[in-house]
Each structure stands twice: as structure tokens, then as C-alpha cells.
Image: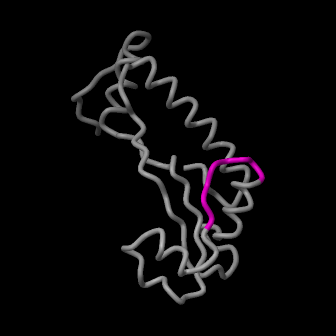
Amino acid sequence: RKMYSSEFFSKMQSKALDRWADVEKASGEKLLQENGLLFYGEDTGETVEGSVLGAREVMKSLNLPHTFYATGDEIADAYPALQSCRGKPYMAVCEDTAGHIRASKACQAMTFAAGEKCDVRTGTKIV
């Protein structure tokens, strides 16, 4: 994901995703599974996870694609499974390109890439 309330983390993640694309290209494996991310709730200011409005501002500032939902009704209209948001003072930001790394495939790709330049050992017991 690139959606953070801090530009620093958003920029770092953008760079990390570029590097993952390099690993995908080198390995021929699709490692990033895009599934989207919806960050929603009542915006009560910055928390450990950030804030909806903070995430929206960073996405806008960095010109990253996103969708903003200003009310719980808008969230419920866009996501029928979230009908419980209807009538609530919720807001949301959706980043369609957020996703996760396929960990097992990523480990295999990294092992393969490193194996050409390093002595990589797998299946060994770590004490």
C-alpha cells in the first residue's frame, strides 16, 4: 500500500514497490497481489494507524490514485457489505492498487536471485 498519513512512509513504500517490480521481472514470478485497501471509520485524529483525512491528504499531495468517501452512506453505497456504515459519521479512502506480497513465492525468487551470487543454503536448522 501507499496509503499512509505520513508522506515519508508513502514515498518509501512507492520505492519498495518499484524494487518488488524488479524482483518480479528478474524472477518471472508475479509476487504482488493487488486486492485494494479501504481505510474507513470515524476520523478522530491521528492514531497509530494514521487517520482517514491524513491518508487522503497524503494521497492527494503525492497525486496517488484513490477514492474518497465523505460519509457512511457513500461507503455503504459503494460497498454493500458495509451497510452498517450507513448514517454514521464515517469517512473512507480506498487505494485500489494496494495489496500484499506472496511471501512463499517472494522467498523463492529471492533465494534464486541470491543463489547466483551467494552460497545460499536452504532446509538447514537454525540454532
Q: Nearer the viewer, residue 84 or 13?
A: 84
Instruction: Name, please, the residue furthest toward the front.
Output: 77
Residue at the image point whose x is 78% and y is 52% from the top? 61
Q: Is residue 64 magenta?
A: yes
Region rendered in magenta: 61-68
Describe residue 62's horizontal placement relative to residue 1 as left or right: right
Dominant secondary structure of the magenta stretch?
A: loop
The percent coordinates of residue 18 (x first, y second) are 58, 31
Return the residue found at the far bottom. 87
Above or below — where is 109 with respect to 42? above
- Tell me: 76 left or right of 69: left
Colouring: one colour
| Image side of residue 108 versus residue 87, left or right | left
- Total marks placed: 0
Counting from the top left corner in percent of width and height, residue 104 is at 30, 37
30 vs 84: above or below = above
Q: Residue at x 44, y 10 (%)?
A: 117
Q: Position of residue 6 (x, y in %)?
A: 71, 57
Q: Is residue 43 magenta?
A: no
Where, by quadrant of the figure, is residue 105 drawn?
A: top left
Where residue 126 sits, quadrant-wise, is top left
- The correct choice, above or below, for 79 with respect to 84 in the image is above
76 relative to 20, above or below: below
For the C terminus, the quadrant is top left
**Picture coordinates of residue 81, whole percent (x, y):** 36, 74
Taking depth in this image into account, of 84 and 7 the one nearest to the observer is 84
